[in-house]
Amino acid sequence: MQSSGPDKGTESFYKINKVAEEYEMIRFEHPGGRLLDSLQKRVVLEGVDSLNLIGKKVLDVACGTGRFSRLFRTQGAQVVGFDLSRAMLNQSRDRQSAEAYVEGSALHLPFKNGAFDIAVSVNAFNHLPAFEEAINEICRVSKRVILGLPHRHSFLLLAYLYRILRGWGYRYTRHKATRYKGVPLIYTRYFSTRELEGILKKNNFEVIRCPKCWIIPFPYVPGRLIKAVQILEKVAVRSLHRFGTFMAMVAERK
């Protein structure tokens, strides 16, 4: 994907070898990160629900280091990992995340219409200003899609404050710049369920479920408080499910 503007910065950031090498360590290899990882995976599997994944052809778009490729592979699926960043794909390959790996742009998937039973993308299209084009493509090549994305209606006051600060990009970029000096701006967007449903409907897809979870700033939670946070998250989801921070929207072709 050759582009300019904030998406170009996102593209450049994830192509940095050091970023790819440290990605899982920084994000998920600590108590808060492990909790975050488990919550997101739980929500995605809730979206899949009772679907038998054994032998299903799954495309993981913008797979990164293969976190969700591995999840689907452990469920018996045949997974193709797809990413723009060769550095990320190398990490995914080293972890044996998928059966095959393809480098390319999410805006131009090199696959035939309906080639996959399921196409999944988690925490990727929120970094892509041309997200609607990417969703169109993921719908074209699959019979069912799973979009794991940050949900706009979550911690409402914080959400609106951060959106004012460069549409969620300010906090996100500042956090990464403390570790990777001189990194480019990373575009980040939060989505509403209505917005995603509208795009999927245009592609003749119908939303069948959209489970959510609350994501507190887990990386900053001391390990001794993780269990308390888990209880808080469960209570929040049950009582305030409309405002979950992370959602896995699942839709299938009509």
Image (tube, grey):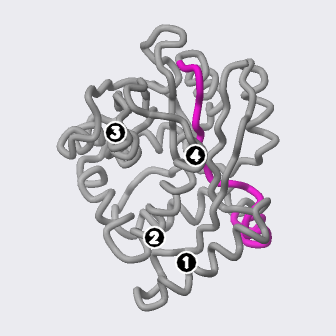
Q: Position of residue 201 (x, y in %)?
A: 78, 25
Residue located at (64% from left, 67% from top):
214
- Report how far apart the C-alphas of labels 4 and 1 lie in the structure: 20 Å
Inspect the image, locate mark 1, and give the three-letter code of the amino acid beneath it.
Gln
153 over 205 or under it: above or below: below
Quadrant in which the C terminus is drawn: top right
- Give the camera-side residue of 173 and 148: 148
Q: Is residue 117 left or right of residue 231?
A: left
| Numbered disc 1: secondary structure | helix
* Magenta region: 142-162
Mark linked to residue 148: 4
Q: For the residues carrying marks 4 and 3, which lies nearer the camera in this image?
A: 3
Q: Which mark is residue 73?
A: 3
Amino acid marked by disc 2? Leu
Residue appearing at x 66%, y 61% in the figure: 245
Q: Residue at x 34, y 39 (%)?
A: 73
